[in-house]
Image (tube, rainbow, N blue to C red):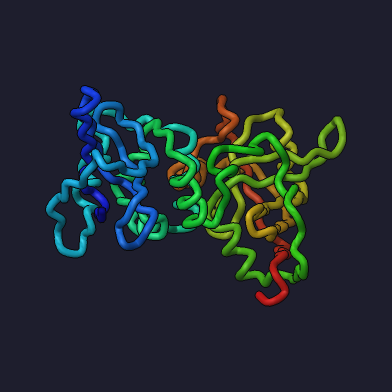
Amino acid sequence: MRAQLGDQLVVERPATGATRRDGEIVGLHHSDGTPPYDVRWSDTDEVTLVFPGPDAHVRHIEHQPGAAGEQASAVSGRTPPGKTPDPGDIGRRIAAERKRQGLTRTETARRARMAPGYLAYLEERQADPNLATLIRLADALGTSVAALRGGGIDLPPGQGQALLHPQLRDLGPDECRARLSTHGVGRIAVSTPDGPAVIPVNYEVIDGAIAFRTAPGTGPAAAAGSEVAFEVDHVDEAMSQGWSVLVVGPARVVTEPDEVQRLAERAHTMPWAGGEREMWVSIQPARLTGRRISPADQ
C-alpha cells in the first residue's frame, strides 16, 4: 500500500457490520508513501495515526503536477468562508514559532512531511495532533514537543543543561540592533519610590530609539527624565544557547502630538498589560552592548 498526501483512506467493514469510514491522509511517516499514515477522519474531523489493515484501501486523488496533494489538503484544511478561525493553544504555538523563524507554511510542512493544508488546519483550528505529528513539527521548527504543548510555560527559561563547550562572545552594535529588531518584550530598570525595579514592557524600535507605552504614575513611567537601562534577551531551550542586548541612555516622555501619532501608527501591538496606556516614553541609546552564548564551533 502506497499513498500521497491528500489521498483518501477507506476502511470497509462488511464482516462486522460496522460503518464504513474514510478520511484524508494528511501526514506520511515514510518517504515512499507506505504506512502508517496520519488520517483526518471525515466523520469526526479528528486526526489519528493509522496502521491500515486488510479491510482498508487507498483511494488516490488526482494530484496536480508537483503539488503532491497539497491543493486537495489545502481545500479541506481551510477555515470555512464566513467563519472566524479559532486556533487552539498548540496551533498558536506552532504558528508563533514558525513566524519567529521566518518560515512559510509550505516550507514548514515540507520539513514536517505533511500537507500545507493540514498545517493550516492545525494553526487555525482547535486541533489535537497526535504525538507523531508533534514530533515531526518540533523537529521541523527546531523546538520540542513539550514546548509546543506549553510545558514549562509557568517556569523561568534556562532550566536545560548547559552546552558541553559553550562560547560567550560580545555582540557588535549591528548585531545588537538586529536582535532588538523592530519590537517585542523587554525589561526596563528604573528607580522608584519603593526602590529599584525591573519591569517588562512591550517596546518598539522606531528611528533607532526604544519606545514603549505606559500610564502616568506607574513603574515604567518613572524612567522619564533619567538615564535608564533596557534589556532584551532570548533563550533557546532546545539548543541551550541564547543572547542578551543591553541599551543604556536617557529616557523622556514624548509630548509632541505629531510624534505621538507617528509612534502609535507604527506600533505593532497594544500593551499586553491592557488598560489605558497612552503615555509614550522614548529611550535614546547612548550605549549598546550584547553577549551571546553558543557552541564553541559557531
Q: Picture quarter containing residue 214? A: top right
Q: Is residue 11 left or right of residue 197?
A: left
Q: Is residue 49 left or right of residue 76?
A: right
Residue that protrudes farthest toward the right in the picture: 195
Residue that protrudes farthest toward the bottom in the picture: 297
Q: Can I make out residue 74 in this image?
A: yes
Q: Position of residue 60 (x, y in %)?
A: 16, 50
Q: Picture quarter containing residue 151? A: top right
Against 216, residue 53 (above or below) is below
Residue that protrudes farthest toward the top in the picture: 17
The residue at 24%/53% (across/down) is: 70
Figure label count: 0
Residue that protrudes farthest toward the front in the picture: 15
The residue at 60%/57% (across/down) is: 180
The residue at 49%/42% (across/down) is: 131
Against 296, residue 101 (above or below) is above
Q: Position of residue 246 (x, y in %)?
A: 72, 57
Q: Can I make out residue 120 in this image?
A: no
Q: Looking at the picture, tell me which residue is in the foreground, 290 or 142.
A: 142
Q: Looking at the picture, tell me which residue is in the foreground, 29 or 184.
A: 29
Q: Position of residue 138 (x, y in %)?
A: 51, 51
Q: Position of residue 39 (x, y in %)?
A: 32, 41
Against 11, residue 244 (above or below) is below
Against 202, residue 16 (above or below) is above
The residue at 59%/42% (across/down) is: 146
Q: Quadrant of the C terminus?
A: bottom right
Q: Looking at the picture, tell me which residue is in the foreground, 89 or 4.
A: 4
